[in-house]
Image (cartoon, rainbow, N blue to C red):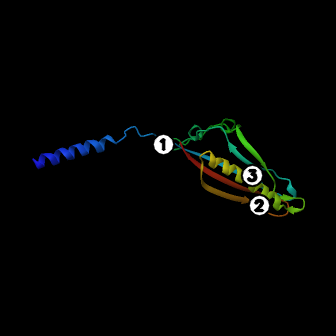
Amino acid sequence: MKKYLLLIVLLVAGFISFSFINEDKPVTEVEYKVITSIESIVSSGLGRSRLISFNADKNYEDYTSAQTEDDNSRNKSKRSEIRVKDFEETKLLNFYNIGGIRFQNIVSNDALVSSKLTTMAAEGWELMFINSAVESDSGEGDGQGIFITRYTFKRVN
């Protein structure tokens, strides 16, 4: 009798535990977004500085080809098809002016970038990576240079 009672209790417990399993698990979608800041380090303040982000979605597969030993044909996508014309652009200040490096410009850029990052966080984006690079003025006759930073965000929908 105790054997049957124990078996019944185990069966009831098993049915109850299986009733909590939800087979309709929501599909988790992850979305990534890249924001780029380009800050001019051209002397005399002649360059352009911007904080940019895309608004249009693009699928990389539309512009990708796979090459094999048998088929090494190149991707024939046109630049005009790849180009995104729907984007957000925030004007930033150049690092230099005629008097040299301008620290107020750098702090102003920091305030604008911080505002953008704060807004992104409020919209549910999580900052995942920051990558920076510099192409600096290489001396006499060059007069070129940028400081670029890419902020990669992730959002789970």
Q: Is residue 16 above or below residue 42?
A: above
For disc 2, the marked residue is 136
Kindly identify the amino acid type of the residue bearing the numbered disc 3.
Leu
Q: Is residue 106 above or below residue 50?
A: below
Q: Residue at x 69, y 36 (%)?
A: 80
Residue 156, given in percent of the width and then of the height, sits at 53, 45
Disc 2, SS: loop
Alpha-carbon neighbours of circle 1 within 10 Å: few (<14), some, or many (≥20)?
few
User: Which is nearer the eye, 73 or 76?
Assistant: 76
For discs 1 and 2, the disc positioned in front in the rendered view: 1
The answer to whether residue 55 of the structure is visible from this angle is yes
Q: Which residue is mark 1?
A: 28
Taking depth in this image into account, of 92 and 121 the one nearest to the observer is: 121
Measuring from the top left, give residue 45's x and y in whole percent. 86, 55
**Amino acid of disc 1:** Thr
Q: Amino acid at mark 2?
A: Ser
As drawn, the label of residue 112 is 3
Q: Residues within 10 Å of mark 2 (few under 14, many from 20)?
A: some
Residue 129 position in % (x across, y down) = 60, 55
